[in-house]
Image (tube, coloured by chain):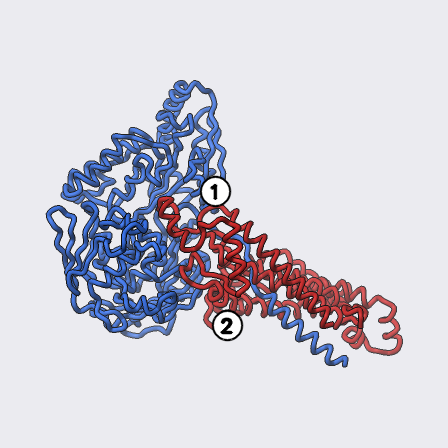
Amino acid sequence: MTRYILQRLGYMLITMFLIATFTFFLMKLLPGSPLAAADKLSEEQQAIVLEKYGLNDPVPVQYFNYMVNLAQGDLGISFQFDNREVTTIILDRIGPSMQLGFQAMVIGTILGMLLGLVSAIYHNGFLDYSSTFLAVVGQSIPSFVFAGILQYYVGVRLGWFPVALWEGWEYTVLPTISLAIFPIAIAARFMRTEMLEVLGSDYITTARAKGVNKFGVVFKHGLRNALIPLITVLGPLAIGLMTGTLVIENIFAVPGIGEQFVKAINTNDFPIIMGTTLLIAFLFIFIVLVIDLLYGVIDPRIRLAEGE
Amino acid sequence: MKKTNWYLLVLALVLSLFLAACSGGDDSETGSEGEGTDTTETDSEGSDEASGDSEQVLNIMDSAEIPTMDASLATDAVAFQWLGSTTDGLYRLGEGAEPEPGIATDHEVSEDALTWTFNLREDAVWSNGDPVTANDFVYAWQRAVNPDTGSEYGPYMMNGVILNAEAVSAGDMPVEELGVTAVDDYTLEVQLEKPIPYFESLTTFGTFLPLNQAFVEEQGDQYALEAETLLSNGPFVMTEWNHGEGWTLEKNQDYWDAENVQLEEINVRVVKETATGVNLYETGEVDRAGLSAEFVDQYSSSDEYRIEEEPVLFYVKMNQENEILSNVNARKAIQMVIDRQGIVDVILNNGSLPSVGHIPANFVSHPDSGEDFRELSGDLIETNVEEAQQLWSTAKEELGIEEAELGYLGGDSEVAQNMDAYIKDQLEQLEGLTVNVESVPFQVRLDRDTAMDYDLQNSGWGPDYIDPNTFLNMFVTDGANNKTGYASEEYDSLIAEANNELALEPVERFENFLEAEQLLIQDDAVIAPLYQRASAQLWKPYVQGVIVNPMGPDYTYKYAYIEGK
């Protein structure tokens, strides 16, 4: 097991290196200048300012310098926020995004699984149709539409929760719900399909014949088997959440990292683009590893450390 | 054993969810034309209903995080806004964009207009207790043009203005040679490169704000990155700065003019979505919200609805390296066929004005009579489709062509795309003309402008100081922002004369600019003016005394107060 993990960590490093390299050179193809007032300065003046950021060097030299600094954990300073360290900026902004994403994933997964379970247990009944309907609606309505509706009716009209801003727990409620809709829908759909399949299999019939009650079967045998495919979609689900966050962050005025990343791309803020890309890449690779390890935990048939 | 596994599973799930929550991003908001950062501020008071005397708290919104609070490095509207609220320069922008005393009480100008001597007040202090002295200006200005600082606006604002700025900013001369010296603690002497008639208004600008040398050097790399590593000498002090979320300013009790500052607190929150801003306004959380076109109809009859005119112009640039556009009749036809009223009524719907020249309305006025430049200059173009057709057929004859195809470079925001589609429609009224619109991001448009890789281009310009020169100087031969291929000796000499021989003759100088504008728009048809931008706002009626500025900080909050909330 340890060897497997070490090996995977090794691959992770290589992957990160490749991502850093590709992103670096792709980024250099972005049109425009990282200077805010490039249209107002002569080329000589621009060159003087670019010198400060080491941008007058040939791209391979810049790449080499960046990688050396990166290896020492130095992500450099931002261009658009003069002199602010990339690490500080990312740390400032990642908190709210993570909190919202975390809350939405927890709520989304739990609610979605429950919906799916109910659907499966009461297959073709009223509850099944209702929850399927909810899942379809949740998956097809874009989150920003839902967010806008929530903000106006729950925030402005009913006044139950703050309309927007980021000043305490109650401020996370509406954005969390908006973000959770998609995970709920996905989890419900998967749960339902898998549970139906599992519940129809022979060993469940056997268990039922032995006298285990309906719910006992569902929770003891069904759930565990249905989890494998669900965990597999959690990765893509998480990515879906990440990309959705920019919109939700803007609508609810959340000081998250999504908007920051897009703005960095629009303003050619190379160090922020690199830093954020690397962070997201790292998290993504890490989640894939966690999911792979989880397979073994959930299902003993999937053995990762084959030698043992 | 089984139980442990389940715990592990739950733990791992939770962990993976937590990590999964990091957000990536897709592109939903991109900047529109060349308008820099659009500031959306809203004033509001969120807390309890004040009885009797209103609580002097203003809660407002801004559309972006402050990029920097370092005056030497600031380049955008958000930074200049909050620098302006926390720091006094030599002068401040007051009502009607008239400079009023800041750290300087008055000044003398030498006969040749090259030496300006400012007398500084002795009661101004920094928020750490240090007095504000002439050296603070010397240090700040030297720092702004010092190549090591990497300032963009330093060279941009000072080169050609302050003596030796050009050489210092290129690293060819030590910073001590910059034409600014402290005669004593409270007398500042500035040597100019040439007479600058608008220098007084320049001294209100962010790049010319003073810096406390000891403090800045002590903070080093950390200077102005947090509220704690900042100093202020102005009406307000920044007491809290939560990056990306917002910031809080409080009244500076040690401000030299503290008795005229009524607001106790300004809370600013970063809100990017117009709809969100409107919702916050509706719930009373903020006192001011900017409106985009789709909200205007809903609110335009409200008492709280206001139009704020801005001296920012938008126009179609025509590249004269293109054979068709090298023909002056073709350019005139393009100018004349566009229905500007339609653009501001249908597309923008926010109080923007049709533009009929290259100096905005209510921007500069005649030095003697006080009449507005725009009034005096009049409508240099009009919309007349028939005449445009005639000019167009003359142009086609002269060029020996039947049909023409032109590329059109526009922005990629929704408003920009609507507008460009509208303009394409208008232009294609000209017989045989096909216009191919290309919607590109702002950065790409800048690149292609620099390379002159366009035929027609939707472009914009806002002033850097209050003088016609900031608009008209653009189109001198080979000017860095010309990029149309326009080269006119007559035009060049009018502008050069205004900036040299006539620098001390305000009336003649003004007339030169009138003549130059006429040449640029009417005779040579270099650009096709479109509109002068305005923004539609909602203001809570209890916010009083906020001054809207045409340049520098968008608003002056020094005299603002809350009444009758």
Question: Splitting the image into 4 quarters, where does residue B529 fall?
Answer: top left
Q: Is residue B138 left or right of residue B305?
A: left
Residue B385 visible somewhere in the drawing? no
Whether B160 is drawn above or below B218: the answer is above
Q: Do the residues at pointers 2 and 1 share their chain?
A: no
Tag 2 and tag 1, C-beta contact below 8 Å: no
Please name the residue shown 23% across and 41% down the image.
Answer: B373
Give the spatial CA distance, label 2 vs label 1.
38 Å
Residue at the disc numbered 2: A170
Which chain is disc 2 placed on? A
Q: Nearer the viewer, residue B264 or B248?
A: B248
Question: Where, by quadrant of the figure, is residue B514 drawn?
Answer: top left
* Residue that protrudes farthest toward the left in the picture: B111
Q: Amino acid at mark 1?
A: Gln
Q: Which residue is mark 1?
A: B417
Amino acid carrying mark 2 in the image: Glu
Q: Alpha-carbon neighbours of circle 1 within 10 Å: few (<14), some, or many (≥20)?
A: some
